[in-house]
Image: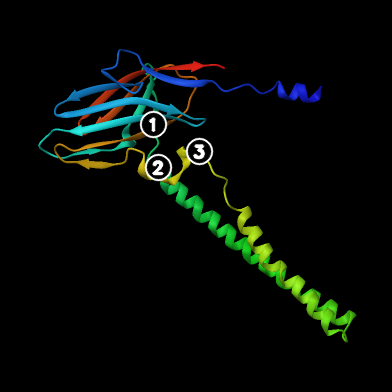
């Protein structure tokens, strides 16, 4: 009965879909793509997918101007309430990767510290075993050697155990360093005729419904209107 009561506390999380409010300019394998063109620059935006933490969009920018332009995802945002100027900024890939590298550095330091502690414990164990063996049986050389081998073999086990315990479990692709370095839209300078595309991520928020994505490029701001729909299993 207690188990049944506990299981009743869990409910499936809604499945998120984000769709354009108006008819998209084109479709690509089921993905609705919004397009906009201003003063020699083309921008496209489309919802890609969501996970427990993020809403993920595909954004593409093409430069047709004679001069170069700068595309910076740090300025992209979702305007969720124009009356109150409430907005959700896109996650900056550079800051995300810096944070992951700093976390990795801290984990490495913790693992090394744990290994040192384990080594000290192992050495102390060896010393204690040697002292005990010497006191108990000074005349039995074979027993002394066997005790020493058994205790010394514990040392690498303790060190390895400490290091393995500090390793993080594998996570979703959105928090994988490779994803952020190779799959996201990153700060890029475009010459004439060049194009950049990549994933743009926002923190997931199931409370919002209609919103407008703003993509600033140089002096221009491209806007794309979307609607978030929750499908409850």
Residue positioned 24% across, 32% down in the render: 61
Residue positioned 60% across, 22% down in the render: 12
Q: Nearer the viewer, mark 3 or mark 1?
A: 3
> Any mark on residue 172, and which?
3
Residue 97, how many percent across, how many down? 42, 46
Sequence-first disc among 2 and 3: 3
Quadrant of image for the N terminus: top right
Mark 2 Cα-neighbour bin, 10 Å: few <14, some 14–19, many ≥20 = many
User: How far apart are the alpha carbons under marks 2 and 3?
Assistant: 12 Å
Which residue sits furthest top? 22
Q: Are marks 3 and 1 in contact (CB under 8 Å)?
A: no
Sequence-first disc among 3 and 1: 1
Identify the image quadrant of residue 209: top left
Dot 3 falls on a residue whose secondary structure is loop
**Residue tagged 2:** 180
Residue 20, how many percent across, how many down? 34, 17
Mark 3 Cα-neighbour bin, 10 Å: few <14, some 14–19, many ≥20 = few
Residue positioned 88% across, 81% down in the render: 135
How is colour applied across the structure in the image?
A: rainbow
User: How far apart are the alpha carbons under marks 1 and 2?
Assistant: 16 Å
Residue 130, how many percent across, how many down? 79, 78
Mark 1 Cα-neighbour bin, 10 Å: few <14, some 14–19, many ≥20 = some
Identify the image quadrant of residue 62: top left
Sequence-first disc among 1 and 2: 1
Dot 1 falls on a residue whose secondary structure is strand
Q: Are marks 2 and 3 in contact (CB under 8 Å)?
A: no
Query: Is 220 situated above or below 189?
Result: above
> Any mark on residue 89, and which?
1
Dot 2 falls on a residue whose secondary structure is helix
Q: Is residue 113 left or right of residue 19?
A: right
């Amino acid at each position: 009965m207690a188990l049944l009561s506990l299981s009743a506390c869990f409910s499936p999380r809604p499945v998120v879909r984000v769709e354009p409010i108006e008819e998209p300019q084109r479709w690509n394998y089921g993905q609705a793509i919004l397009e906009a063109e201003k003063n020699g620059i083309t921008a496209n935006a489309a919802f890609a997918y969501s996970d427990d933490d993020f809403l993920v969009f595909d954004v593409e920018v093409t430069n047709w101007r004679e001069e170069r332009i700068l595309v910076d995802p740090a300025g992209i945002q979702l305007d969720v309430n124009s009356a109150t100027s409430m907005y959700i900024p896109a996650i900056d890939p550079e800051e995300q990767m810096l944070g992951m590298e700093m976390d990795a550095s801290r984990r490495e330091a913790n693992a090394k510290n744990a290994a040192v502690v384990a080594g000290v414990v192992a050495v102390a164990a060896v010393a204690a075993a040697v002292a005990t063996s010497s006191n108990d049986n000074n005349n039995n050389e074979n027993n002394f050697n066997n005790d020493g081998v058994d205790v010394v073999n514990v040392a690498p086990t303790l060190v390895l155990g400490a290091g393995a315990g500090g390793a993080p479990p594998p996570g979703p692709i959105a928090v994988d360093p490779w994803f952020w370095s190779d799959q996201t839209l990153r700060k890029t300078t475009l010459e004439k005729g060049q194009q950049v595309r990549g994933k743009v991520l926002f923190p997931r928020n199931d409370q919002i419904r209609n919103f407008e994505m703003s993509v600033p490029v140089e002096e221009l701001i491209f806007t794309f209107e979307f609607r978030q729909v929750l499908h409850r299993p």
